Amino acid sequence: MLLMLRTIMILPKIEKITRDATISHFFVMFGYKLFSIYYPLFLVARGFSLPEVGYNYLLIYLPIAAFAPIVGFLNHKINPAILASLGILGYGVYALGMIFIQNLLLFYFWQVLLGISAALFFASSRAILMGFPLENYNRAFGWFYSSPFYADAFAPVVGAFFIWKFDFLGVFILSLVLQFFTAAFCFFRLRKKTIKLVDVGFKFEHLWQNYQKAFQKIREKIILVPLLVSFSALLLGGFYHSFFVLFLKDLSWSQNQILVWGSVFSLVFLPISLFAIRQISKQRSEKNIFYGNSLAGFFSVLLGFFSVFLNFFSVLFIMIGRAFGGLMTSSGRSGLISKRLKNYPEEAGAIDTIFSPLGIAFGALISGLLVGVLGYSFLFIFGGAFVFLAGILGRQWQQSP
């Protein structure tokens, strides 16, 4: 964890605004991932069916998409650093709520609250990055999107210790405390830098006009095709959010093996992500999307096709390849939106925030419906093949006259 932060602080090719947004993202994800890796296992242990696991992710991610436009409007009226900090506090309140779960209805309420909190944080953070004249948007978002991988390297280990020592009560309290400190960091590091983004005279009719202009730009072929291609990768991400851990369990992996694998994967991916960011910054956003999509799809097909032969290291190799492709696609999508909608950063941040969770939510829904028919292996083959072809066909479609 200290290695990642030290690396971010000393690299000359990262702006201060990108650095502080990335560090905030890292600690938000660290606090959440203290327990989130166990979430699918937790749901199955509580008697949820496989389709219901997918529906639960839908319940989290749909509120993000639904509330992102509202947050986009608020970003005009209120400093986005304040809204991002409130979103982080929401993650802390969610951890507190998980301590006091008493019935199923209350459990669902906390999932929706988590989605609203995520909308506040991500739409505002993206608006901050998109609202600044950054030297390289692809590189900036490469850093921003790579930070959860660093959290994955350490958070599950720390979380496992606290669960072992203090049960889930201990890990939820730790998450609560960490999120409150993260909210303070985000507020004090970003508030003064983002004051100029506020326009108190902005009215709702201006918002509608901005969205109309933004969507007119999006309908252009040079933007629409890459965005549609990147959406397919998000659908595949929904497959993995819902069922990858259960897939490993189906391979007879123990919970401890899954925990160790997750930490090793993220530690190994840390230096690889630094290489990925350098490559991402050298290429056009569209190219990052098309090649990243095909790479993620290819490795997903490998995972499903060779599932009966997989061991710890082969899963590690395949998932590093898929993560590399996913990082390229996500960074390329946000970089593309940033550049093409640079006159509407608040709306661009909201659109990007709608796009991402909507893809994952529908991916979780689709995979929940298909997994009972296809099984885990064919689910990943089907999803991977779709994403791989989307990357190839999308590139050819955009290049055609």
Image (cartoon, helix red, strand yellow):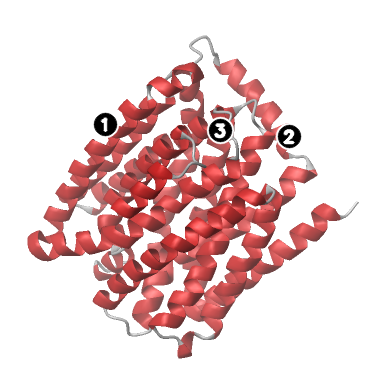
Q: CA distance from mark 2 to mark 1?
A: 37 Å
**Residue placed under numbered mark 2 in the picture:** 217
Q: Does residue 22 appear left or right of residue 286 in this picture?
A: left
The answer to the question of whether label 2 and label 1 lie on touching residues, with beta carbons closer than 8 A, is no
Q: Quadrant of residue 221?
A: top right
Q: Quadrant of residue 96?
A: top left
Q: In this view of the protein, can residue 51 be seen by the observer?
A: no
Pick whichever of labels 1 and 3 is earlier in the sequence: 3
Q: Does residue 231 appear left or right of residue 22 in this picture?
A: right
- Residue sitting nearer the eye, 263 or 201: 263
Q: In this view of the protein, can residue 185 be seen by the observer?
A: yes
The answer to the question of whether label 1 and label 3 lie on touching residues, with beta carbons closer than 8 A, is no
Is residue 100 placed above or below 337 in the rendered structure? below
**Residue placed under numbered mark 3 in the picture:** 130
Residue with the most extreme right position? 401
Question: Callout 3 environment at 10 Å: few (<14), some (14 to 19), or many (20+)?
Answer: many
Q: CA distance from mark 3 to mark 2?
A: 16 Å
Q: Position of residue 190 (x, y in %)?
A: 38, 28
* Amino acid identity at mark 3: Met
Q: Give the secondary structure at mark 2.
A: helix
Assign the N terminus to one quadrant of the image. bottom left
Residue 352 got which mark? none
Residue with the most extreme bottom position? 309
* Amino acid identity at mark 1: Ala
Q: CA distance from mark 1 to mark 3?
A: 22 Å
The answer to the question of whether label 3 and label 2 lie on touching residues, with beta carbons closer than 8 A, is no
**Residue placed under numbered mark 1 in the picture:** 184
Residue for point 47% across, 45% down: 144
Q: Give the secondary structure at mark 3.
A: helix
Pick whichever of labels 2 and 1 is earlier in the sequence: 1
